[in-house]
Image (spheres, rainbow, N blue to C red):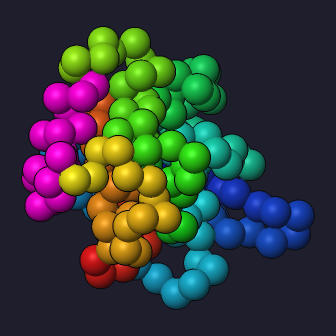
Amino acid sequence: MIQFEKITKSFGDLVVVDKLDLHVKEGEFLVLIGPSGCGKTTTLKMINRLVEPTSGDIFVKGKNVMEMDPVTLRREIGYVIQQIGLFPNMTIQENVDVVPRLLGWDKERRINRVRELLSLVDMDPELYTNRYPNELSGGQQQRIGVLRALAAEPSIILMDELRGT
């Protein structure tokens, strides 16, 4: 499903990922563990082209990511960033359904998906869909970030350094 072939990423003279070969099969979970600054986040960001490799090839579902439209690629991959990244001017409903909305899901389907996901994490949809991120605790905000990554039912989810909620 995800394949790295001799991936290298450099920032100037600093090599942060060096000739990485990695194969992740469908249904597998992979955890990258290492000290701060060792290239974990950079590796994740290369999968969805937030960072482009210096050399080598990355394939997602058999397609070279460098030959794919980056916006389309990102809409097919759920991504939870370190800083959560909720949009402060959007309600929880709008934050969670942002990708399904961009994909053209109808309003009823989006509403139902958000309600379903909120229920999964013990957040009553009646209480939370119309709230804003600043009205939530840090742990609740983190859960919403995860739900946003899951909302469009992606086959790949990238999660970068989540802390306990």
Q: Looking at the figure, which quarter contains the C terminus?
A: bottom left
Q: Is residue 108 above or below residue 136?
A: above
* Magenta part of the chain: 110-126
Drawn side of residue 3 relative to residue 65, left or right: left
Q: Does 119 appear in magenta?
A: yes
Residue at screen point 46% across, 82% down: 34
Residue at screen point 37% across, 33% down: 97
Viewer-nearest residue: 121 or 79: 121
**Residue 67 position by quadrant:** top right
Drawn side of residue 42 relative to residue 149, left or right: right
Magenta-colored segment: predominant secondary structure = helix
Drawn side of residue 65 relative to residue 59, left or right: right
Viewer-nearest residue: 90 or 65: 90
Residue at screen point 88% across, 64% down: 12
Q: What percent of the width, then of the height, locates residue 60?
A: 41, 33
Residue at screen point 35% across, 39% down: 93
Drawn side of residue 13 relative to residue 103, left or right: right
Q: What percent of the width, then of the height, locates residue 62?
A: 38, 26
Q: What percent of the width, then of the height, locates residue 31?
A: 32, 68
Q: Is residue 92 above or below residue 71?
A: below
